[in-house]
Image: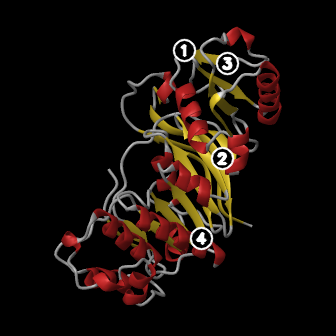
């Protein structure tokens, strides 16, 4: 069963259109999200990726019930998160990009305040222990490091034992240990059946955590699937240095090679075949290939390739993006605004929230 369903989502901002066709500007205003469709299964970690201005925040705000869609349908746990927020907020937790908490309160006071407006709340100390802040309960918020504030944001998002958890750049500002601990926590939440929608600029984090992901470019989804599926569409890379007395023209490869001095870089979808051909040729020719490296494409390379394609002049809202996966929607535009704070449900009402999104 799907915990999140998005079909044909569009989000338009009123105002004079000045950005042009590529960015989704129309006579009716600025269209930040255009015809986006995807789903997130129960108990799944789903990563929504994209460059700044790709439309991620504009999309996630609709899922969180903070904004009404201009068109399309959105369901979270079977309900409209905006029109039926009283049924959705108590069952979801939201960690926005930055916390907006009173700086003079202690960590324990902040957690206690939050638990007071959250239905079926965990004990405040339990929430703090989960994220590794149990020993910092008496410290004032203003004295926390950036990474510790992110941990506090996460503790508050988990206070209501959410069925669906929205994490917006959860590990920004954390040190490597904090990022590792947060990743382990997210995996544990998945094992308990929690559905997680994650946005992050740490692509290795998405590659390691996400069961599936979607990459947004100019307001549309241009690639989707498992991390392995998205990466598999991109070529592998072989690099090496030729001896000074060997000309690149002697290479046996039937695929294009980029040559920079003695350094050769080959991109191929047939890594094993190309590498075997190269090694056999080198052995028969008595040539040593210095610094030989062969590796599959990474999610970062796939992401950068998509971003670069979207920046080319011929790219636009009516042209298909690279690597569009089956069953995904399309659209253009650029997300605007930056999230701050943490949102959670309280009872069956509209929920409680700290921080604002501009």
Q: Which residue position is annotated with label 1?
A: 261
The local crowd at label 1, few if under 14, some if 14 to 19, many if 20 or more residues have their Cα within 10 Å, is few
Foreground mark, 3 or 1, reads 1
- Give the SS element for disc 2: strand
Q: Which residue position is annotated with label 2?
A: 37
Foreground mark, 1 or 2, reads 1
Foreground mark, 4 or 1, reads 1
Please say whether residue 321 is visible from this viewpoint. no
- Give the SS element for disc 3: strand
Q: Which residue position is annotated with label 4?
A: 187
Between discs 3 and 2, the one toward the N terminus: 2
* Residue in the picture at 71% in, 9% down: 249
* Distance Cα–Cα, label 3 vs label 2: 38 Å
- Give the SS element for disc 1: loop
* Distance Cα–Cα, label 3 vs label 1: 12 Å
The local crowd at label 3, few if under 14, some if 14 to 19, many if 20 or more residues have their Cα within 10 Å, is some
Q: Residue furthest left?
A: 104
Between discs 3 and 4, the one toward the N terminus: 4
Residue 248 location (% of width, % of height)? 67, 12
Between discs 4 and 2, the one toward the N terminus: 2
Residue 349 location (% of width, % of height)? 45, 77
* Distance Cα–Cα, label 4 vs label 2: 25 Å
Q: Which residue position is annotated with label 3?
A: 257
The quarter of the rendered structure image containing the N terminus is bottom right
């Amino acid at each position: 069963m799907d915990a999140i369903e998005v079909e044909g989502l569009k989000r338009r901002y009123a105002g004079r259109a000045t950005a042009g066709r590529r960015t989704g500007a129309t006579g009716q205003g600025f269209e930040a999200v255009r015809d986006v469709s995807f789903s997130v299964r129960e108990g799944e970690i789903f990563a929504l990726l994209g460059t700044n201005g790709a439309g991620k925040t504009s999309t996630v705000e609709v899922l969180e019930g903070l904004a009404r869609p201009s068109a399309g349908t959105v369901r979270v746990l079977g309900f409209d998160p905006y029109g039926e927020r009283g049924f959705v907020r108590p069952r979801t937790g939201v960690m926005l990009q930055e916390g907006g908490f009173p700086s003079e309160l202690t960590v324990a006071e902040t957690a206690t305040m939050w638990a007071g407006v959250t239905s079926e709340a965990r004990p405040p100390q339990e929430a703090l222990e989960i994220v590794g802040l149990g020993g910092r309960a008496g410290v004032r918020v203003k004295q926390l490091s950036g990474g510790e504030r992110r941990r506090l944001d996460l503790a508050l998002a988990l206070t209501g034992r959410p069925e669906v958890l929205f994490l917006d750049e959860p590990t920004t500002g954390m040190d490597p240990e904090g990022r590792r601990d947060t990743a382990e926590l997210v995996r544990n939440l998945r094992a308990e059946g929690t559905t997680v929608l994650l946005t992050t600029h740490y692509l290795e984090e998405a590659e390691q955590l996400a069961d599936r992901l979607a990459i947004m470019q100019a307001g549309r989804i241009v690639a989707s699937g498992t991390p392995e599926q998205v990466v598999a569409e991109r070529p592998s890379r072989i690099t090496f240095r030729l001896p000074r007395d060997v000309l690149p023209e002697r290479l046996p490869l039937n695929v294009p090679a980029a040559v920079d001095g003695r350094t050769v870089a080959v991109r191929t979808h047939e890594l094993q075949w190309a590498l075997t051909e190269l090694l056999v040729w080198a052995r028969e020719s008595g040539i040593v290939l210095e610094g030989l490296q062969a590796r599959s494409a990474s999610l970062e390379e796939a992401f950068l390739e998509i971003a670069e394609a979207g920046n080319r002049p011929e790219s636009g809202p009516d042209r298909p993006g690279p690597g569009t996966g089956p069953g995904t929607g399309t659209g253009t535009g650029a997300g605007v605004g930056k999230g701050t704070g943490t949102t959670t449900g309280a009872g069956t009402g509209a929920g409680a929230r700290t921080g604002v999104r501009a």
